[in-house]
C-alpha cells in the first residue's frame, strides 16, 4: 500500500533530523573565523570528548580570540568540564617558512598540558603530513620540554626533544619545509631569525633530511590536555605574530 506523500515527507524529515541530532552531539559547527598573520583561522568546537586527548574543544569568543596583543588560546574550566582550544587555517599552505612568536608560561605548565603548532592534512597518507613543534611533558613530573617532530614520532630519528631552559615567557619558532628536508629553530624572546643577532638568542636548531609531500595541509595550533586529565590551573597562550612565506624553487 502506498503511503500518502505527507506521511513520506514527515518520515523523511524525522529521519533527517534524527541523523542531524546524532551528528551534532559529536561536533558543533561554528562559521566564525579569525583574521591573523595574513591568514584566516577557523575554530574547532566539540561537545563530546574528541582527539587529541580526548578533550572538549571550545570556540567561544571568551576562549579563543584576536586582539592587539595577538591570537589567544585558552585552557579553562566551565560547567565542570575543562575546555581545550584549537584553530586551523582556512588556506592550504604546504612548503614554505612558518615563523611565529609565542607568549605563554610554558615552564609552569601542568604535566598534562600540551601546546602544539603543526601542519596537518586530513588525508592519512604520510602520517597526515604532520610536522610539529610542541611544548609538553606528556604526564611526566620532570617539567615541560620542547620537541620537534616529523611524524611518526615512534621513529627516534624523526623526533628531537630538549629542555628549552627558558628565561622568560616569550619564544620565537621557525619551521622551514621544502621538498628535500624539514628544519626547525627556536629562540628566546621576540626575534627575527633572519637577523644575525638572533643567533645569540638561539635555544635549539634541528633538521630532518627527508620531507613529506606537500599534500593539502593546513596549519594548526592547539592547547589541550594529554589523556584529558584535569590540570592544576587554567592556561593562557598568545601567538603574538605569525608569518607564512611560500617556498619558491
Image (cartoon, helix red, strand yellow):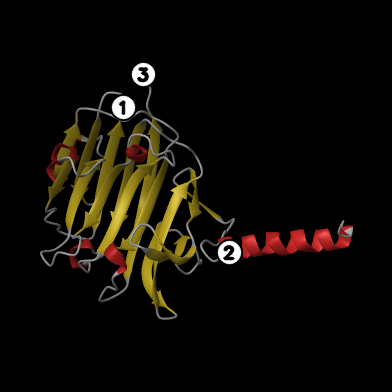
Residue that badge 1 annotates = 178
Viewport quadrant of the C terminus: top left
Q: Residue at x 57, y 60 (%)?
A: 23
Return the disc, 2 or 3, that comes first in the chain's sequence. Answer: 2
User: Residue 144, image x and y in percent?
Assistant: 17, 60
Return the disc, 3 or 1, that comes first in the chain's sequence. Answer: 1
Between 76 and 193, the one nearer to me in the picture: 76
In front of the other: label 2 or label 3?
A: 2
User: Residue 248, image x and y in percent?
Assistant: 38, 22
In which image quadrant can residue 4 be found?
Answer: bottom right
Instruction: State the mark number for residue 22.
Output: 2
Determine whether, in the image, residue 155 is placed left or right of residue 242.
left
Q: For label 3, count other residues whose C-alpha is less than 10 Å away and answer few (under 14), some (14-19) or many (20+).
A: few
Q: Residue at x 19, y 65 (%)?
A: 139
Q: For label 1, count other residues whose C-alpha is less than 10 Å away and answer few (under 14), some (14-19) or many (20+).
A: many
Residue that badge 3 annotates = 249
Determine whether, in the image, residue 3 is placed left or right of residue 85.
right
Q: Secondary structure at mark 1?
A: loop
In front of the other: label 1 or label 2?
A: 2
Q: Secondary structure at mark 2?
A: helix
Amino acid at each position: 500500500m502506498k503511503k500518502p506523500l505527507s506521511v513520506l515527507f514527515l518520515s523523511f524529515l524525522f529521519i533527517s533530523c534524527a541523523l542531524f541530532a546524532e551528528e551534532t552531539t559529536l561536533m558543533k559547527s561554528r562559521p566564525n573565523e579569525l583574521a591573523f598573520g595574513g591568514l584566516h583561522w577557523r575554530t574547532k568546537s566539540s561537545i563530546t570528548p574528541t582527539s587529541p586527548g580526548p578533550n572538549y574543544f571550545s570556540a567561544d569568543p571568551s576562549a579563543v580570540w584576536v586582539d592587539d596583543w595577538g591570537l589567544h588560546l585558552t585552557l579553562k574550566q566551565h560547567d565542570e568540564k575543562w575546555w581545550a582550544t584549537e584553530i586551523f587555517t582556512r588556506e592550504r599552505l604546504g612548503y614554505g617558512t612558518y615563523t611565529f612568536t609565542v607568549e605563554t608560561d610554558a615552564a609552569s605548565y601542568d604535566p598534562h598540558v600540551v601546546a602544539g603548532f603543526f601542519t596537518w592534512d586530513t588525508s592519512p597518507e604520510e602520517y597526515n603530513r604532520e610536522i610539529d613543534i610542541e611544548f609538553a611533558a606528556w604526564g611526566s613530573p620532570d617539567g615541560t620540554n620542547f620537541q620537534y617532530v616529523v611524524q611518526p614520532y615512534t621513529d627516534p630519528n624523526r623526533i628531537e626533544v630538549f629542555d628549552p631552559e627558558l628565561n622568560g615567557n616569550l619564544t620565537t619558532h621557525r619551521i622551514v619545509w621544502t621538498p628535500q628536508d624539514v628544519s626547525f629553530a627556536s629562540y628566546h624572546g621576540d626575534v627575527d631569525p633572519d637577523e644575525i643577532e638572533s643567533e645569540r638568542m638561539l635555544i635549539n636548531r634541528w633538521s630532518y633530511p627527508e620531507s613529506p609531500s606537500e599534500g593539502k595541509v593546513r596549519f594548526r595550533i592547539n592547547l589541550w590536555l594529554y589523556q584529558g586529565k584535569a590540570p592544576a590551573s587554567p592556561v593562557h597562550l598568545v601567538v603574538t605574530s605569525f608569518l607564512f612565506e611560500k617556498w619558491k624553487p
